[in-house]
Amino acid sequence: MKNSKSLSLIVLLALVLAVRLAFLGLFHHRVFSGPSTQFEQAFVAINLLDGNGLKTFQAPPRAVDATDPARILDPERYEISSPELLPFVKEVTGYSFFLAGLWKIFGTKLWIFAQIAQLLLELLAAWGLYALAKRFFDRKAGLLTVLVFAFLFYEVRSSVIPYKDIFLLYVMLIITLFSSRIFFRQGRPWIWFILACAGTGIGYYFMPSIVLYPLFLILTLWILRRINFRSAVVFLLLAAAVVGIMVWPSQNYVRAHRNEPGVAPPLFWYRLWLGNQVRSFYSTEEERFQDYFRERTQATGKTIEDICKEEFLTYVKAHPGPYALHTAKKLLYGTFLVYANAGDAAYSTSWNFFKTQNPQAGFSAYAKANPLRILGMLAGTLSASILFPIALIALFLLKREKRFDIGLFLFSVPLYFLLLHMFFHYEARYLTGTLAGYLPLAGYVLSKIGKKGKPAAASTST
């Protein structure tokens, strides 16, 4: 009997791997984020390997034999245009260290090593989701959680992209496993909380949006009466100390170099501006978007960050009501209709080319000409957008079973990211951290289908 239980999990893990290998075979050669983000992480990794520290090249390296602009080129196929280096503070650099470590081991700078490593991390994530759902519900819910994870198309697409977005899931899963110990009052809560804060500090170097999560976790645990007010205050001090110490090296480096000539500053106001203006453009990769900033930087001499800060604050001060309404609508949009591309991620390039060739044609004509790409986009968006409604169903069922506290604890994970990102531009790939809460709830709902009688008590063991 035990062997059959283990076999079920092994089969599901094999399914998780098979689906992701299929996506890797289809899209391993496709550019995802463009050289402004994906390749900058690689250029920093190259300098880390060369012992130059957190630096990037003053002049972007030139691609060798770039015959297809939609095809991702391995970093070793770039020629260094200039030996001049600049400090890199535009983004956090956790993924650069990840790349540098892999390339050091394998001795060559190929994207495929990162993609294979991420597939292995996907298997660990699937096992972690199983353990998490089993801890809160039962084994059946754990297995069904892994099944949902296997076919979560937008997450699958993100997992085979050599870029940092997917790491938010891995870090949040670890943090949620640690914090679940506090929820079930297992062991010393302050130790588990310190570990959760340490995970947050590591996660910051991949996705800074995670940095405030310990504060939200403290509030959740206090509301659910897993900690008292005094413990909440102690946890607050621990969070400030642990996360602060881990984040300080990055912040200190940014402060030391952000105002140096030629250094691109961190993008904060740009993201707020983009969250308010994103519908004005098809994509940040399109020429019209690039021209918008090129004209303003040339006319004013200001950086993109300065321009965005000025335009965003001017708009909010002049239109506070419309901005608040727009932000609230974006929250609803982000919960029930999250855009996610599970197909060829070169949609913006393809659409712009189609409009160039067919200036009078609309989206319906484009869809008829590219049915598989549109199908992939629909599959990705659907797989992302069903999670919030399923979570609401889970909360309803758990309330009837008098286990509403479990539902609220797991639901607090996606709620944190939804509330935070409602002020910014976001797609499903920015919300991979929500899956640590969404997927166990989805597995639980599926486990209730066709089940009769009184539900079993929640399991508190892994």
Image: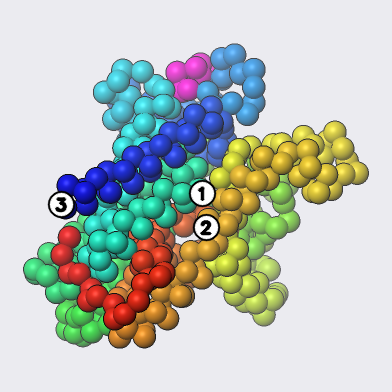
| Residue range highlighted in magenta | 74-82
Cα distance in 3D space between marks 2 and 1: 7 Å
- Residue position marked by numbered label 3 in the rendering: 2
Instruction: State the image quarter where residue 86 is shown.
Output: top left
Residue 364 is inside the magenta segment? no
Residue at 37% x, 47% y: name it: 167
Choose the circle earlier in sequence order: 2 or 1. Answer: 1
- Residue position marked by numbered label 2 in the rendering: 384
Residue 144 visible in the current orientation: yes
Secondary-structure class at tag 2: helix
Cα distance in 3D space between marks 1 and 3: 33 Å
Instruction: State the image quarter where residue 7 is shown.
Output: top left
Secondary-structure class at tag 1: helix
Instruction: Residue lying at the far left in this picture: please name it.
Output: 187
Q: Amino acid at mark 3?
A: Lys
Kindly identify which numbered label has been placed on residue 154. 1
Mark nearest the camera among 1 and 3 is 3
**Spot occupied by residue 289 in the image (x, y as percentages of width and height):** 71, 46
**Tag 2 near tag 1, CB within 8 Å:** yes
| Quadrant where the image shows the C terminus | bottom left
